[in-house]
Image: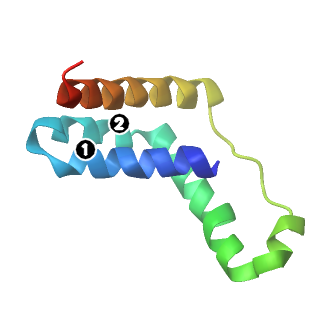
Amino acid sequence: MDALSNFIDLFGDYANSLENVSHLQAFRENPVIESYISHYYRFIFWPRLQQGDRFKDAERPALETDHSALLSVFREMKAHFEAGLNSISGN
């Protein structure tokens, strides 16, 4: 969950960084992505910082989302991100 959250945050930063990619912010604002990020920060990121070693033994609620929709949106985000990197590198 950490890696996906980091990618989503990076993607959001990328979408906000240049005017010609600002349209990509719509992916970051997708409800399934928002739900994932909300769950991650509420039940993983902040509790891990606050609880320290006790975090690993704590029970957390399952992620209640449409996993196939999450995967689909992630794949689209990844494709746009890679296309942007390729256009910068000239590939």
Task: Classify the position of the C terminus by image quarter.
Answer: top left
Q: Circle 1 — which element?
A: helix
Q: Earlier in the sequence, mark 2 or mark 1?
A: 1
Packing grade of label 1 (10 A; few <14, some 14-19, many >=20) is: many
Residue 34, visible in the rendered structure = no
- Work out whether residue 90 or residue 8 is closer to the camera in this orientation and state it: 90
Q: Circle 2 — which element?
A: helix
- Work out whether residue 15 or residue 68 is closer to the camera in this orientation and state it: 15
Judging by the rendered image, the residue that carries numbered circle 1 is 15
Amino acid type assigned to the residue bearing label 2 in the image: Phe
Above or below, 32 against 83 in this view is below
Residue furthest left as drawn:
19
Q: Position of residue 69 (x, y in %)?
A: 55, 26
Judging by the rendered image, the residue that carries numbered circle 2 is 27
Which residue is rendered at x = 38% and y = 23% of the image? 79
Circles 2 and 1: CB atoms closer than 8 Å = yes
Which residue is rendered at x = 58% and y = 47% of the image? 3
* Residue 90 in which image quadrant: top left
Above or below, 6 against 28 in this view is below
Above or below, 50 against 91 in this view is below
- Work out whether residue 61 or residue 4 is closer to the camera in this orientation and state it: 4
Which residue is rendered at x = 62% and y = 66% of the image? 45
* Residue 77 in which image quadrant: top left
Which residue is rendered at x = 45% and y = 41% of the image? 31
